[in-house]
Image (tube, rainbow, N blue to C red):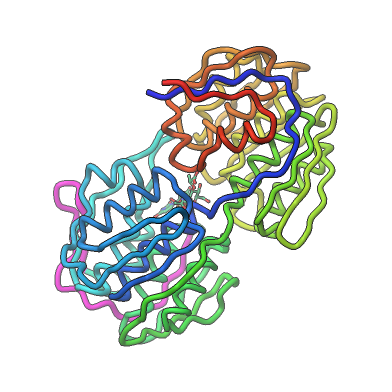
Amino acid sequence: MDKLRITGGRPLEGAVRISGAKNAALPVMAATLLAPGVHTLRNVPRLRDTQTFARVLEILGAKIAVDGDLMTIDTQGVNAVEAPYDLVKTMRASIYVLAPLLARFGQSRVSLPGGCAWGPRPVNLHLAGLQAMGAKLEIEHGYIVGRGVKLKGASFGFDVVSVGATVQLMMAAVLAEGTTVLENVALEPDVTALGEVLLACGARIEGLGSRRLVIHGVAGLRPVDATIIPDRIEAATFAAAAAMTGGSIRLERVIPDHFEAALLKLEEAGCTVRRAADSVAVAGPARPRAVDVVTQPFPGFPTDMQAQMIAVCAVASGTSVIEDTIYLDRFTHVPELARLGANIELKGNVAVVKGVSRLSGAQVMATDLRASACLVIAALAAEGETVIDRIYHLDRGYEALETKLAALGATVQRVN
Ligand code: EPZ
């Protein structure tokens, strides 16, 4: 099992090219099932999760070729409708194949995703929305089974803002009979980017970027040549690393608006941030100031940066209060940060972080994707050596992280 060995204490300096967004690539990969033919996707990040999703599509009969960050997906030959448990359990987003398979074949058998490191991840909104559109879904032996489904346009409101459920229902609606109105949809850039890809395939969608989408079903869609948007969470993670190490880095090939809430919070913590069209320069202070954070759906502060922000606050001057309103138990990184000397008191979904002047290196364990990233940036600021175990979690969502960090001057080595 791979580990990362990091010696902290050096400020990060230099430029880093941010990869394509995991959370934008996965929905677009699923959407290729809607349009038989050869799709060309560019700026696709090389991650465990994109590789897992490619395997799911191949099991369904798609032909996939990868050349660097170029991925071609031929969905002409898709002839199966089952997404098996052993793949879905490793990546929840596999459930994104449900709607496209129902839309194209009228049937589907997709394993219910399990939980994840920090607790249950319900899919009730996915199912309720599809049922509102006429899908008769049964749960059989841990699988969501749809048979003889002809999706029809419907009006559906999300009582909780959900990225995945919004993506799922957009893909159900574009080929449904009639018009679908979706209220209170997620506004994450990954969702808007999927909408733009669907429009390029010939879908008819009004209201992209607003909380209300009106989607007129069409008879068929054509394959697309699309470029995946940059990963705003990877970019914000590097910005947090600069904040922690007093470094000065330039994030290249980013869309600053996509992580403005994180940039504003880092400025509040004392960082100097300079935004350009497709790059952002971030210089960390000698020591960050304490800040309070409440995670919200986009455009609010993203839950996927909650762990990284706790790491920054762990070395800040003062006490920070960090609340996650999206996932109430996404704090498995807190006990691991405590091993590095952080002083954090957890009260339900609120972390009270009393900044310490220095963290000190230790052996720690990654528990999920963003918790791993939090431990990496904490290790970069800690005195001495930190060894992070189980970094396969990190490989799910960060492409060549140790290579990028080393290029910024970090002392980091992957060992197994
Ligand atoms: C997406 O997950 C992201 N994953 C997550 O990123 C991210 O944390 C999350 O959105 C929130 O921004 C991908 O895009 C692949 P949700 P998703 O549905 O779609 C509740 C990462 O680190 N909910 O927006 O699964 C849910 O419990 C990952 O890259 C229901 O109640 O999240 C949560 O409280 C981790 N019923 C809230 O909605 C449902 O049917 C938001 O979840 C669905 C969700």
Q: Is residue 143 magenta?
A: yes
- For this rendering, which residue is in front, 149 or 379? 379
Above or below 209: residue 94: above
* Direction from residue 224 to residue 311 in the image, left or right: right
Identified at 54% across, 23% down, the residue is 413
Quarter occupied by residue 253: bottom right
- For this rendering, which residue is in front, 403 or 233? 403
- For this rendering, which residue is in front, 62 or 367? 62
Above or below 196: residue 219: below
Above or below 203: residue 377: above
Q: Quadrant of the N terminus?
A: top left
Q: Is residue 389 magenta?
A: no
User: In the rendered image, is residue 135 in sight?
Assistant: yes
- For this rendering, which residue is in front, 107 or 278? 278
* Direction from residue 218 to residue 307 in the image, left or right: right
Quarter occupied by residue 277: bottom right
Identified at 31% across, 87% down, the residue is 219
Q: Quadrant of the C terminus?
A: top left
Q: Residue furthest front?
A: 67
Q: Residue 329, image x and y in percent?
A: 49, 34
Read off the magenta span.
Answer: 136-159
* Direction from residue 86 to residue 366 in the image, left or right: right
Q: Residue 150, image x and y in percent?
A: 22, 78
User: In the rendered image, is residue 162 in sight?
Assistant: no
Above or below 96: residue 313: above
Quarter occupied by residue 118: top left
* Direction from residue 285 to residue 375 in the image, left or right: left
Q: Residue 96, image x and y in percent?
A: 35, 59
